[in-house]
Amino acid sequence: MRTKICGITSYEDAMVAIEAGADALGFVFYEKSPRYITIQKAKQIIEQLPPFVEKVALFVNEDAKKIDATCQKVGATLAQIHFDASDELYDALKIPHIKVIRAQSKEDILQYSQQYRLVDAYCEAYGGAGKRINLEWFDGVDCSKIILAGGLTPQNVASLKRYNFYGVDVSSGVEISHGKKDATKVKEFIDNAQS
């Protein structure tokens, strides 16, 4: 399974994740998030990163122009659309992007089944709540284009192997505090996801 460490707020945490083998890093451009990062700070971090790492910019309730402009300014390679966006917004985006499904039922996870998508547990807040999705919903479902998020930890990530998810996305499960990663947990999470 590919791994994304989300809610990166420092160069040190970015490098901890990369050195542990993360495939992607997530940067949160949503001001109400405890993991919010400014454009300037994200740009400083991303400019120093080694090549071949996906740099994902997470957005909530922004328009296509703002999403494209922010991604271009900071050097993000992918936008993660963490809200119920219209088809018009997706069509208008120039940056490669991934849709997020905030699942409340088994039917929800079947949306966009022909596309790569991120599936998270529904909660009132957007992302990073550490709420776990009902895994039984994935029984008998082709998960090869699903990136699973929500309530993942180094302890439970290995149990996902049988579903054959494309990837996993973690934030709070590898933190000391909001936006500050625990190097040991990051390494353990990635090792357990990839072993």
Image (cartoon, grey):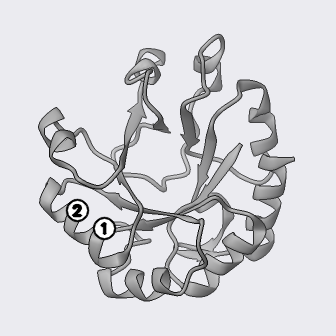
Q: Secondary structure at mark 1?
A: helix
Pick out the residue farthest to the top. 140
The label shown at residue 52 is none
Q: Report if residue 21 is visible in the image.
A: yes
Figure check: 189 above or below 83: below
Residue depicted at x 20% and y 69%: 69
Quarter containing the N terminus: top right
The label shown at residue 68 is 2
Estimate the x, y position of residue 113 in percent, counting from the top left.
Answer: 44, 21
Q: Secondary structure at mark 2?
A: helix
Task: Tell me which amino acid carries mark 1.
Answer: Cys
Residue depicted at x 15% and y 46%: 92
User: Which picture quadrant has residue 73?
Assistant: bottom left
Say how many tags the image has. Answer: 2
Residue depicted at x 60% and y 18%: 142
Left or right of 71? Residue 98 is: right
Task: Tell me which amino acid carries mark 2.
Answer: Asp
Judging by the rendered image, the residue that carries numbered circle 1 is: 71
Q: Report if residue 31 is visible in the image.
A: no
Estimate the x, y position of residue 76 in percent, counting from the top left.
Answer: 39, 67
Q: Quick one: 133 or 17, which is closer to the camera?
A: 17
Estimate the x, y position of residue 8 in percent, counting from the top left.
Answer: 52, 73
Q: How far apart are the two marked residues, 1 and 2, measured between alpha carbons?
A: 5 Å
Residue depicted at x 22% and y 41%: 90
Figure check: 7 above or below 50: above
User: Which picture quadrant has residue 154?
Assistant: bottom right
User: Which picture quadrant has residue 185?
Assistant: bottom right
Does the residue at mark 1 contact the one at mark 2 (Cβ under 8 Å)? Answer: yes
